[in-house]
Image: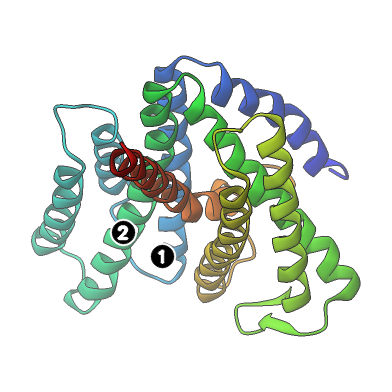
Amino acid sequence: MKYAREVTAAIGAPLIIWIIGWSPTVVYDLVIASVGALALYEFLILGRKKGYELPIILCILLMLFMMAAFVLEQVSVEMGVFASLLVIPAFYVFSRKPIEEALPSSAIAVLATLYVGMLGGSLIRLRNDYDALQPKLGSKLVFFLLLVVWLGDAGAYYVGKRFGKTKLSPRVSPKKTVEGLAGGVAMSVITAVIIHYTFLREMPLLHAILCGAILSVTGVIGDLAESMWKRSAAVKDSGSLLPGHGGFLDRFDSILFTAPILYTYWHVLQFGFTTLNIMQG
């Protein structure tokens, strides 16, 4: 379909806005878990394309348990990590898979499960934890993350297409350039400043600028990491469930990579403000 990318965005954008800003917590959590399950499925399929047998259903169940740990007080995140590190190797111990494939197969399965589960879980924490502290603060931070990363990605594409000459990582992604990266960082910073002045006054201007730059650069690294895995598996896209955008792992690779960074940054920022107020008091 010629305009598949635009149609997908037109349908998906309003839905995403409602889910982040106005949906009940349980709906948001279920959507993130569903996206994580689909992204993990695509990740594991990359491993299968390399010829390794991976326990897809088991990995998805462990990932969902890990996601639940980010929501339920009765379950700790460590328990989800421990379960993955224990159950997946145990599966290969008792399976009849070729012993020669045990090391790379179990390594891929553990990496994929922890990568999507832990990084995706931070998206749940980013909204839920900070919404609990201040109404809609977490939702604003998720909007900040998506807009800064995705608009930065668009800026990098158009600047790189027009001015790009110096390859950023030719082995992994031949089309990405240093000039495109600079354009993406500039667009992310501009977006962060606009967001500060429109709906996120809680984030000081200096920190909005710093966050914009950091998230832009780390978003590119996350995108390059996924491109590296796809190139290793000799595929162009991780999937085809999002017409015009590839798969869920393609669309959310940068978001998965940057969500824990923004969560940690805001946590440290608030800790610094609290400490400063105590010292001044």
Residue shown at 33% from the left, 44% from the top: 271
Q: Nearer the viewer, residue 24 or 239?
A: 24
Looking at the image, residue 266 sits to the left or right of residue 59; the answer is right
Residue shown at 74% from the left, 70% from the top: 182
Please determine whether, in this image, residue 210 is positioned above or below residue 161.
above
Please determine whether, in this image, residue 74 is positioned above or below residue 113.
above
- Real-space CA distance between mark 2 and mark 1, rounded to the nearest whole angstrom: 7 Å
Q: Earlier in the sequence, mark 2 or mark 1?
A: 1
Residue shown at 71% from the left, 69% from the top: 181
| Image quadrant where residue 66 sits | top left
Q: Position of residue 252 (x, y in %)?
A: 56, 48
Q: Mark 2 = which residue?
A: 54
Q: Say whether marks 2 and 1 touch (CB < 8 Å).
A: yes
Would you call the spot at circle 2 few (<14 residues within 10 Å), some (14-19), or many (20 or more)?
many
Q: Position of residue 220 (x, y in %)?
A: 60, 64
Residue type highlighted by circle 1? Gly
Outermost residue to the right: 162
Q: Position of residue 210 (x, y in %)?
A: 58, 57
Where residue 47 is drawn, which disc sits there? 1
Does residue 53 appear anywhere in the picture? Answer: no
Q: Nearer the viewer, residue 145 or 45?
A: 145
Would you call the spot at circle 1 few (<14 residues within 10 Å), some (14-19), or many (20 or more)?
many
Looking at the image, residue 80 sits to the left or right of residue 109; the answer is left
Please determine whether, in this image, residue 236 is positioned above or below residue 150.
below
Please determine whether, in this image, residue 76 is positioned above or below residue 28.
below
Secondary structure type for disc 1: helix
